[in-house]
Image (cartoon, rainbow, N blue to C red):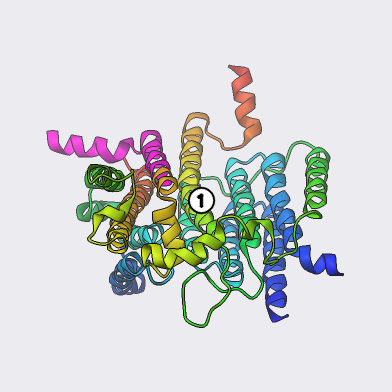
């Protein structure tokens, strides 16, 4: 019961933060609220037994993404968002309609935390039983990430590398140009 | 009552998802759009982790005395998705910086106006 | 920038601890929560903090963008190279069983090495991205 209570509390904090992000026009405040949002979601991950995920979300969402967004804000020199030019009825209708369809879709989903749900039946029991004997690694998440699904992770690392190359191509020219100038002088 | 207790988590996640979606389609400021996309992304993470949760289970690290573990597979998928997400967000922010340098603004409306006057 | 005395002292005290914690997360990821992705992010946070407090110019003296560019690709090469190594030893791509004397020992070696590759790539890409943003408005 206490689990549900904490979960509901954190989830409603998340919802309140999301509404505040939509309503506030000051971009600095929006970005700080997004940092809070990430930290709260990390807390929810802890409640849902996902220690590794919470760890990553706290470091990435609360740390790096906030810093990068603030850096963008400093580069674009714009503090306030302009009030929207169009009426908000069309997007609101689209969102409510999509949300209603999704909620209708959840009615067929197994209950939250159901051990007999199809998602728990497929490969998960194999990982839970065999990962210790197959790899000798107590942390199943590491075992699945690095060993069973090594191809996936190789792809993810390549995506991160490619994104880094993209950022360098877009805005990184100063880093290398200046060094060349110094070499010439 | 039974239905609410067993599905409330999914509903709040859908609410967050729609909050992010609404920010993306209704706001013209590019930084705010990216914040909206990130909210959407985090709520998808929450949906996956909610699906992987097992009642009475513990975190998927082998310890003595634990009998039930949460499903490790969604954790793996989301853990990598978070780091890939920040890398792609950085790419989007870099594009915003370049757009500001080219157009002098990060408001969608003003960019459209400049494009049409060319 | 030059007068933030408290900020400077505190971050000088914190940065070694953050780096130490990153190494702990990297090499203890098999047993507790952690692994290459988290360690890389935490390691880059130490450098981002240093850049924020002491400026990009002094951060570039410690680790230059050129070195970071090489490290970012080195991580991917370590990961893919582990797969090639297992191919050469007669197993499938990224099948670590053949890397050690017993399959379990081989798995251990494989997981440690590829996590190291992940950590190096993630850390250097994150620092490189932050350098790009920080260096955009100079000169």
Q: Nearer the viewer, residue B84 or A166?
A: B84
Taking the view exactly as shown, the residue that stands out farthest to the top is: B118
Kindly identify the residue that appears in the image at 40 percent across and 34 percent down.
Answer: A170
Kindly identify the residue that appears in the image at 31 percent across and 38 percent down.
Answer: A174
Q: In the rendering, at what x and y percent does residue C52 appear?
A: 36, 59
Question: B51 left or right of C77?
Answer: right
Residue A53 visible in this rendered orientation of the protein: yes
Crowd around label 1: few <14 · some 14–19 · many ≥20 (10 Å): some
Chain of residue at mark 1? B
Residue C34 visible in this rendered orientation of the protein: no
Question: A11 left or right of B49?
Answer: right
Q: Quadrant of the C terminus of chain A?
A: top left
Q: Is residue C66 above or below residue A23?
A: above
Circle 1 residue: B81
Q: Nearer the viewer, residue B32 or C4?
A: B32
Kindly identify the residue that appears in the image at 53 percent across and 55 percent down.
Answer: B78
Question: A87 left or right of B90?
Answer: right
Q: In the rendering, at what x and y percent does residue B58 appear?
A: 56, 74
**Number of numbered discs present?**
1
Q: Is residue C122 above or below residue A170?
A: below
Q: Nearer the viewer, residue A9 or A155?
A: A155
Q: Quadrant of the N terminus of chain A?
A: bottom right
Q: Magenta: predominant secondary structure element?
A: helix
Question: A64 left or right of B70?
Answer: left
- SS at mark 1 in the image: helix
Q: Is residue A174 in the magenta section?
A: yes
- In the image, which residues are magenta? A156-185
Q: Nearer the viewer, residue C87 or A173?
A: C87
Q: In the rendering, at what x and y percent does residue A62 appear?
A: 51, 62
Q: Is residue C25 in the magenta section?
A: no
Q: In the rendering, at what x and y percent does residue A90 appear?
A: 81, 38
């Amino acid at each position: 019961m206490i689990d549900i209570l904490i979960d509901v509390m954190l989830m409603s904090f998340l919802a309140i933060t999301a509404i505040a992000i939509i309503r506030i026009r000051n971009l600095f405040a929006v970005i700080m609220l997004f940092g809070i949002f990430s930290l709260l979601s990390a807390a929810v991950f802890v409640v849902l037994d996902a220690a590794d995920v919470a760890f990553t979300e706290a470091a990435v969402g609360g740390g790096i993404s906030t810093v990068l967004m603030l850096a963008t804000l400093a580069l674009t020199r714009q503090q306030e968002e302009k009030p929207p030019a169009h009426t908000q009825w069309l997007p609101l209708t689209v969102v409510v309609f999509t949300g209603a369809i999704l909620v209708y879709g959840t009615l067929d989903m197994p209950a939250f935390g159901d051990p007999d749900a199809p998602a728990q039946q497929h490969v998960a029991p194999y990982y839970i039983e065999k990962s210790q004997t197959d790899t000798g690694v107590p942390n199943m998440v590491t075992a699945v990430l690095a060993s069973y699904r090594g191809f996936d992770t190789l792809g993810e690392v390549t995506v991160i590398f490619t994104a880094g190359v993209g950022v360098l191509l877009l805005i990184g020219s100063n880093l290398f140009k200046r060094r060349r100038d110094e070499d010439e002088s | 009552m039974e239905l609410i207790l067993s599905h409330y988590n999914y509903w709040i996640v859908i609410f967050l998802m729609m909050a992010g979606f609404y920010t993306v389609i209704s706001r013209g400021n590019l930084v705010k759009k990216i914040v909206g996309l990130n909210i959407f992304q985090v709520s998808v993470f929450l949906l996956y982790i909610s699906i992987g949760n097992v009642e009475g289970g513990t975190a998927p690290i082998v310890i003595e005395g634990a009998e039930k573990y949460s499903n490790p597979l969604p954790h793996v998928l989301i853990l990598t998705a978070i780091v890939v997400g920040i890398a792609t967000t950085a790419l989007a922010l870099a594009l915003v910086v370049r757009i500001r340098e080219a157009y002098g603004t990060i408001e969608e409306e003003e960019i459209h106006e400049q494009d049409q006057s060319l | 920038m030059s007068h933030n005395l408290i900020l400077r002292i505190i971050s000088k005290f914190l940065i070694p601890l953050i780096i130490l914690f990153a190494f702990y997360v990297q090499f203890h990821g098999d047993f507790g929560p952690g692994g290459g992705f988290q360690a890389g992010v935490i390691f880059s946070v130490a450098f981002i903090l240093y850049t924020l407090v002491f400026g990009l110019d002094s951060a570039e003296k410690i680790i230059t963008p050129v070195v970071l560019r090489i490290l970012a690709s080195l991580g991917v090469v370590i990961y893919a190279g582990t797969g090639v190594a297992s191919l050469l030893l007669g197993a499938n791509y990224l099948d670590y069983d053949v890397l050690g004397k017993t399959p379990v020992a081989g798995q251990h070696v494989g997981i440690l090495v590829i996590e190291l590759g992940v950590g190096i790539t993630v850390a250097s890409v994150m620092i490189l991205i932050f350098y790009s943003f920080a260096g955009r408005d100079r000169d």
